[in-house]
Amino acid sequence: MLSVKGIHTYYGLSHILYDVSLEVSKGEIVGLLGRNGAGKSTTMRSIGGLTPPRQGTITFHGEPLAGKSAYRLVRQGIAYVPDDRRVFADLSVDDNLEITYKGSPEWDKNRVYDIFPALREIKDRRSGNLSGGEQQMLTIGRSLMTAPELLLLDEPTEGLAPLIVRDLEQQILRLRDAGISILLSEQNVKSAMRLIERAYVIDNGRIRFKGTVAELEANEEIKKRYLMV
Ligand SMILES: Nc1ncnc2c1ncn2[C@@H]1O[C@H](COP(=O)(O)OP(=O)(O)OP(=O)(O)O)[C@@H](O)[C@H]1O
Ligand SMILES: [Mg+2]
């Protein structure tokens, strides 16, 4: 479904990604694991059209994405959920969802509230007053309102308490069960391993490992060198 082949991405003169390739198939949760500054967000931004690669190809359902704006990609079913949990602070939870709605009969507010019942409870609250976990649910919920086929989830558990992380994991699994494919970037390898079937390990802008969770679990060297676990 998503195929990234040999991309090189830069910020100005800084060469950040080197020959990064990865694939996500329909209905999969795939991990993109790596520590601070490894290139996870840059990979997500490259796919989501925010920082287009200078070399290499990205195809979605076989169709090249080069030159398409982030907005066009959202319409094609690719939603990037950045790690900064940006919501419209002055608007209520419900209004934050409403203004992102793209008219899909499949994904509306009610379906989002079914995935995140905690959001329904606080639907009239001002979004600026939410906890970190609530803001993360709302950010994901907003992207669901665009009816994505592929969700690019950038470090969703960052800074959240362990119990909240566990809840979020259940919700991410529910999204997968609803048919959404997910590329999940994480430094929190333990959490990611509970969700993913396959993983890519990135370090210094290069893919250092690709394989199943069992293969990664057994690879002490990769874990020690690039993941600090
Ligand atoms: N806007 C930018 N301009 C220049 N360099 C950047 C920019 N954003 C990130 N970088 C650099 O690109 C490299 C990869 O950063 P990236 O944000 O992709 O890493 P990451 O794996 O997402 O890290 P983190 O876990 O901290 O989110 C880092 O060396 C970082 O300093
Ligand atoms: Mg990042």
Image: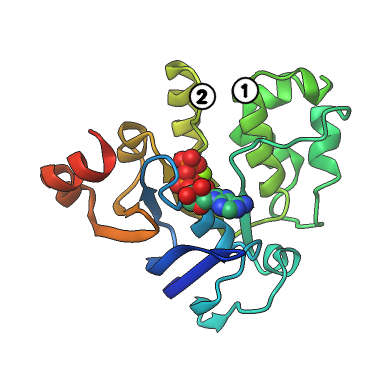
The answer to which of marks 1 and 2 sits earlier in the sequence is 1
Q: Residue at x 34, y 54 (%)?
A: 202
Badges 1 and 2: C-beta atoms under 8 Å apart? yes
Q: Secondary structure at mark 1?
A: helix
Place residue 87 in its image quadrant.
Answer: top right
**Compared with residue 141, is residue 176 higher up or lower down, i.e. above or below?**
below
Q: Residue at x 66, y 61 (%)?
A: 50
Residue 177 appears in view: no
Report the side of 222 relative to 148 (left or right). left
Residue 161 appears in view: yes
Kind of residue at disc 1:
Gly
Front in this rendered view, residue 113 or 16: 16
Residue farthest to the bottom, as pictured: 63
Mark number, residue 132: 1
CA distance for labels 1 and 2 = 8 Å
Front in this rendered view, residue 115 or 143: 143
Residue 80, percent across and down? 61, 53
Q: Residues within 10 Å of mark 1 (few under 14, many from 20)?
A: some
Front in this rendered view, residue 63 or 43: 43
Place residue 68 in its image quadrant.
Answer: bottom right
Mark number, residue 159: 2
Report the side of 115 relative to 171 (left or right). right
**Compared with residue 81, is residue 85 higher up or lower down, i.e. above or below?**
above
Q: Residues within 10 Å of mark 2 (few under 14, many from 20)?
A: few
Which quadrant: the C terminus? top left
Closer to us: mark 1 or mark 2?
Answer: 2
Kind of residue at disc 2:
Gly
Q: Is mark 1 within 8 Å of ligand 1?
A: no
Q: Secondary structure at mark 2?
A: loop
Mark number, residue 119: none
Q: Residue at x 64, y 37 (%)?
A: 84
